[in-house]
């Protein structure tokens, strides 16, 4: 009889303790986690060949050097930004939609090689006319200039997320790695100075891009994070419009890029893996068998 009594009392208590132990804390790498972040970037670009096509001209400049806009006097240093929203569709794997707002500007006082044809009288400012073959051409951006005020890479990213280190009973601090591949489209806003004409902010879908990313996410109290990382890849601008009112004028360019970025964001556990993860805590309630003897 005594054995039956102990069995009746202890089994519910053990079951309750087991249910407590099976509960898992919400962590950022679990399926059902939503995240969003925003921050700023610094970009680097490879040399490239820029092709320009329009009414009366078809030429290219090879060996062109370009830079972002963070080193140019009077430019807002925070005008290059990254924004992203994503979702963990499985443990440790996430998909996200992002916008990398970069800028690209050709360097002043650089010597390039000019190839192609420019009709006579089309460019009275620089005096270019005729057919050229590997002709040295020094760029004076006051007379000839090409700037992507908005080199926007709208991309989808597939990430592998892994917790590397964490501190605290409730994961007050967590360090998470993020390795990803990304692909998307390019939307450009271009300033072009040529032949005495200056056209600003001509917008167009200009091409495609692919890249890879590696970064670290510093998470605080499971809901806020700061992330820093590096991405690099390849941009193919097949048809970037240069003059707004001439749809047949455009540039093309193949370009490698590298980008350092730092962002801040938030984590939301909208579909936690553990069904009771968000349940309210009502405190301890004694099993019925124990209540009967209290």
Image (tube, rainbow, N blue to C red):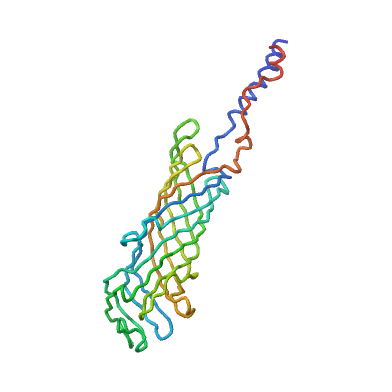
Question: Can the viewer see residue 117?
Answer: no
Q: Which of 222/2 is in front? A: 222
Residue 153 location (% of width, % of height): 47, 62
Q: Position of residue 282 (x, y in %)?
A: 63, 26
Q: Quadrant of residue 130?
A: bottom left
How many numbered badges does the structure rendering display? Answer: 0
User: Compared to 279, does 242 lie above or below?
Assistant: below
**Looking at the picture, does residue 76 appear above or below residue 55?**
above
In the displayed structure, does residue 59 sit left or right of residue 286? Answer: left
Frontmost residue, 193 versus 285: 193
Q: Is residue 67 left or right of residue 219?
A: left
Closer-to-camera residue (268/169) = 268
Tell me the residue at 55%/49% (across/down): 87
In the picture, residue 258 is in which quadrant? Answer: bottom left
Where in the figure is residue 4, as x and y percent of width and height?
Answer: 71, 14
Q: Quadrant of residue 143?
A: bottom left
Q: Quadrant of the C terminus?
A: top right
Residue at 30 percent of width and 78 percent of height? 113
| 224 to the left or right of 103 | right
- Front one among 237 and 243: 243
Which residue is pictured at 60% across the width and 40% down the height? 273
In this view, 286 is above or below 183: above
Residue found at the very far top of the displayed protein: 2
Quadrant including the N terminus: top right
Q: Position of residue 218 (x, y in %)?
A: 43, 42
Q: Is residue 232 visible?
A: yes
């Amino acid at each position: 009889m005594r054995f039956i009594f102990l069995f009746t009392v202890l089994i519910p208590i053990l079951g309750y303790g087991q249910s407590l132990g099976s509960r898992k804390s919400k962590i950022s790498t679990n399926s059902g986690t939503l995240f969003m972040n925003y921050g700023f970037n610094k970009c680097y670009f490879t040399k490239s060949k820029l092709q320009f096509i329009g009414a009366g001209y078809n030429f290219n400049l090879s060996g062109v050097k370009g830079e972002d806009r963070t080193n140019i006097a009077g430019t807002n240093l925070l005008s290059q930004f990254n924004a992203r929203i994503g979702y963990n569709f499985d443990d440790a794997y996430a998909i996200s939609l992002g916008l990398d707002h970069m800028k690209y500007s050709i360097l002043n006082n650089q010597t390039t090689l000019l190839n192609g044809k420019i009709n006579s009288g089309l460019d009275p400012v620089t005096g270019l006319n005729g057919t050229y073959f590997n002709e040295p051409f020094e760029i004076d951006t006051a007379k000839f200039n090409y700037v992507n005020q908005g080199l926007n890479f709208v991309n989808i990213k597939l990430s592998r997320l892994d917790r590397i280190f964490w501190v605290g009973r409730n994961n007050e601090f967590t360090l998470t790695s993020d390795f990803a591949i990304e692909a998307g489209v390019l939307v450009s806003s271009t300033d072009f100075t040529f032949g005495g004409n200056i056209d600003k902010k001509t917008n167009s879908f200009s091409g495609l891009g692919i890249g890879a990313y590696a970064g670290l996410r510093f998470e605080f109290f499971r809901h806020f994070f700061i992330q820093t990382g590096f991405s690099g890849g390849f941009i193919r601008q097949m048809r970037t419009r240069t003059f707004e009112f001439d749809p047949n004028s455009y540039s093309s360019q193949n370009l490698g890029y590298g980008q350092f970025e730092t962002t801040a964001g938030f984590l939301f556990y909208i579909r936690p893996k553990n069904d009771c993860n968000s349940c309210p805590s009502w405190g301890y309630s004694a099993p019925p068998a124990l209540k009967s003897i209290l």
